[in-house]
Image: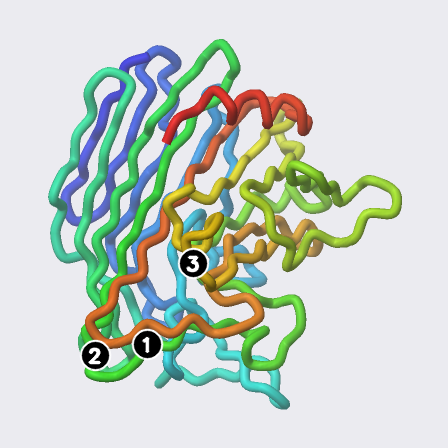
Amino acid sequence: MTLALTHAHGDRITVTHEATGTDLFAYVYRPEAAWEAPKPYLHPIRTLSGALVTDYRPNDHRWHKGLQLTASHLSGQNLWGGNTYVHGEGYVALPEKVGSMGHVAFDEVSAAGDRAVIAERLTWHPYDGELWAEETRRIEVCDVDPDTGSWSFTWTSAVSNRRDKDLRFGSPTTHGRPAAGYTGLFWRGPRAFRDGRVFTADADNVDAGKVDLMGSQAPWLAYVGEHDGRDGHATLVFEHSPANDHAGDRGTHPAHWFVRSDPFAAVAPSWAFHEELVLAPGDTLARGYRVTVADGAWDRERVAAHLRRQEW
């Protein structure tokens, strides 16, 4: 189960599962087009068998890049990319509102045995380049299991407000567009994953009588898609860390799932679905997630059993 790591300095870090020869993911930190709100991202992400489970710069949203941390509405700026949602006008080209998240340094880049770690420092900027926030980020491959055909990684980020005023995290929904509460960690699936099955511990988008899971709350959410170009399915499971301050009785700002299976596959544990999240000067917003990537179409029972065996 040995993992290997290749660092193309200034460009990307690739983590490989040596037994299968599969590149599990690439972490790309090279800046890209300004209009797409440059920021590091994971793409491609693959299952242990090598099946692709992310999309990159699709023609409907060029700023969708694998899995990345985003901020669609941040104190009047757009660190998401592309056009900006304006209530009453729709999506408007406002390049002077498109910001960026930039790589500063790596504190750790390592692989040993069945674990790999990428620990990074980043800065967040509005269009004019002012320093608005500093982030520490850690991505860690924490479980590779050929017996179940799955592997997992955690993503933890701590974002500290460096302005002398509040940072206000919002979304198109907080600005007037229903069912568009995307912000925070965001995954875009391959085009073939459209119309996939989405379920949580107690709800399913294909069960008769069940409501859309958009805007729902649950500790985890699973997405099952079917591949083009090869037979079979893949399952991705997104989990909130128990340490997140919205979990249990730890805090008051709720988290809701942004999830779509039509017209494309997308999941985000939203930071600001229905209401803005306000970060005071000097304060830090910390969030952690685990993503499990599995070959095959897992059902609710299999996901739940797998998660019970995992430890944070």
| Label 1: element kind | strand
Residue at 20% x, 25% y: name it: 111
Marks 3 and 1: which is nearer the front? 3
Name the residue beneath numbered marker 2.
163
Residue 232 appearing in the image: no
Q: CA distance from mark 3 to mark 2?
A: 23 Å
Quarter of the image where one finds residue 19: top left
Assess disc 3: are there few (<14), some (14-19) or many (≥20) residues with their C-alpha within 10 Å of its C-alpha. Answer: few
> Which residue type carries mark 3?
Gly
Residue at 53% x, 63% y: name it: 182
Name the residue beneath numbered marker 3.
251
x and y percent of residue 302 in the render? 63, 22
| Label 3: element kind | loop
CB under 8 Å between discs 2 and 1: yes
x and y percent of residue 208 in the render? 88, 42
Q: Is residue 195 above or below residue 140?
A: below
CB under 8 Å between discs 3 and 2: no
Q: Is residue 78 above or below residue 239?
A: below
Residue at 37% x, 33% y: name it: 153
Residue 50 appearing in the image: yes
Is 219 displayed left or right of 193 in the figure?
left
Name the residue beneath numbered marker 1.
167
Q: CA distance from mark 2 to mark 1?
A: 8 Å
> Which residue type carries mark 1?
Leu
Which quadrant, please, contains the N terminus? top left
Quarter of the image where one finds residue 124: bottom left
